[in-house]
Image (cartoon, helix red, strand yellow):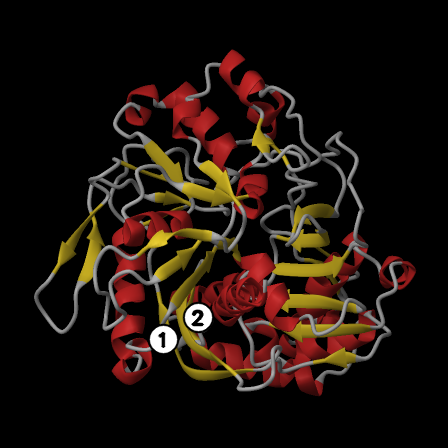
Amino acid sequence: MAAPSVILGIDLGTTSVKAAVVEAAPGDPSGFVVLASCARAARAEATAQSPLAGPTCAREQDVSRIIQALNECLAALPQQHLRKVCGIGVSGQMHGVLFWKTGQGCEWMEGGAAPAFKPRAVSNLVTWQDGRCNSGFLASLPHPESHLSVATGFGCATIFWLLKNSPEFLKSYDAAGTIHDYVVAMLCDLPRPLMSDQNAASWGYFNTQRQSWNMEILRTSGFPVHLLPDIAEPASAAGRTVRAWFGIPKGTQVGVALGDLQASVYSCMAHRTDAVLNISTSVQLAAPMPSGFQPAQTPDPAAPVAYFPYFDRTYLAVAASLNGGNVLATFVQMLVQWMADLGLEVEESTVYSRMIQAAAEQRDTCLTITPTVLGERHLPDQLASVTRISSSDLSLGHVTRALCRGIVQNLHSMLPFQRLREWGVERVVSSGSALSRNEVLRQEVQRAFPFPVSFGQDVDAAVGAALVMLQRSLTQEES
């Protein structure tokens, strides 16, 4: 049987959903062509009062809106490509958790242009941005047997919070996973959700060397371990689609879901001497560790660099900042609100373009902004600050230039270029929506990292998820 040559890749991100149809290039094992792609804004911030709504720092998304955006993406892709799809790769925002009832998590709608599913008996998604687990609560949790610390927004931390604050809520469900684990489970009608080590590590209380949850630690603490998904190799076969789906044939193979970080890196990293920088809603700087590298099995909550599972039991060194494009968005919203308070109505898009233009003309500034309005996982209580303020540096150009520089400098403080050089990095490959829209951010990246920097990569996690599935299928065919 010939290896699948057309793969659908899906990425369920924090702010948008993307889908891409990828075809293997004939005669080139590493080549590919993106036949079609589509993205839709999710606009999924939960508005209804949720049974698990915690303090004001809680961050939840409406799963129905995410799936609606996914359905809109697939409906927009050409039917002639979808009919040829032989495999589906899925990635999505890491760390988050949602709950559902096995066998009742969705219903299929046969009417309309194409069969599609919509969520049923599903909770909101508590995202990676969730802040309900403060430092005091995290300190009360048992120490994990893992090289990764547990932070707010991590799936297991959220479940511990619910166990303490809303135990009745947890009794309503018998399955849990990330948003992308949920989609895979629904497509394949899995009796139990499957989770890759990439996503399991992002939940906490997972030992990557043993490839297992910290069951004894969790059981002793009263944790509802029956909610934990089974573990499987990333992109290995999770199952097959139980229905035809937007023209994709019934019985199409679906891979175990990937983390969006790993999928993004996979789509960007041409050589093992590349580091991959992504600045979108948040920021990630990743570099591959040598084969055989094993992180210390004692978590260090204060360490700014974490080691995440990649593929084939290797690791990525990752500096993951919570403060990226979302900081710029917060600044824009503040300006729009100030102007509204003054009786002026201005579109956010207009404000954004004007402030970037002003910063581009302002090549330097003495103003210093530490932009950590969301804290950082290794410094959860850190707030933002503005220093070296003078009357000459208060123009929109100065402030925006300082804000963009602060985002990049904050990342550089977490993973300096000197350390990348020690690991053998020779080039930085950059991608992400915030970088593509913002020439000032690109300038500041070049200023901070004295390597050749490649910009404008036309890649994303959806393409990466497809490529991983494509490569796996080709490898299996060869063996």
Towards the viewer: 116 or 416? 116
Whether residue 455 is visible to the viewer of this picture, yes or no, is yes
Of the residues shown, which amino acid type is indicated by label 1? Glu
Towards the viewer: 129 or 194? 194
Q: In which quadrant will I find the C terminus?
A: bottom right
Q: Residue at x 79, y 60 (%)?
A: 412
Label at residue 339: 2
Of the residues shown, which amino acid type is indicated by label 2? Met
Q: Residue at x 58, y 25 (%)?
A: 214
Helix, strand or loop status at disc 2: helix
Q: Is residue 242 above or below residue 80?
A: above
Looking at the image, residue 353 sits to the left or right of residue 209; the answer is left
Towards the viewer: 105 or 381? 105
Residue 351 placement (x, y as % from top left) = 49, 78
Residue farthest toward the left in the current orientation of the protein: 111
Residue 164 placement (x, y as % from top left) = 42, 19
First in sequence, mark 1 or 2: give its number.
2
Give the CA distance from mark 1 to mark 2: 7 Å
Label 1 Cα neighbours within 10 Å, binned few <14 / some 14-19 / many ≥20: few
Looking at the image, residue 142 sits to the left or right of residue 413; the answer is left
Label 2 Cα neighbours within 10 Å, binned few <14 / some 14-19 / many ≥20: few
Looking at the image, residue 434 sits to the left or right of residue 462; the answer is right
Q: Are marks 1 and 2 in contact (CB under 8 Å)?
A: yes
Q: Residue at x 59, y 27 (%)?
A: 138
Residue at label 1? 345
Residue 345 placement (x, y as % from top left) = 36, 75
Whether residue 282 is visible to the viewer of this picture, yes or no, is no
Q: In which quadrant will I find the N terminus?
A: bottom left
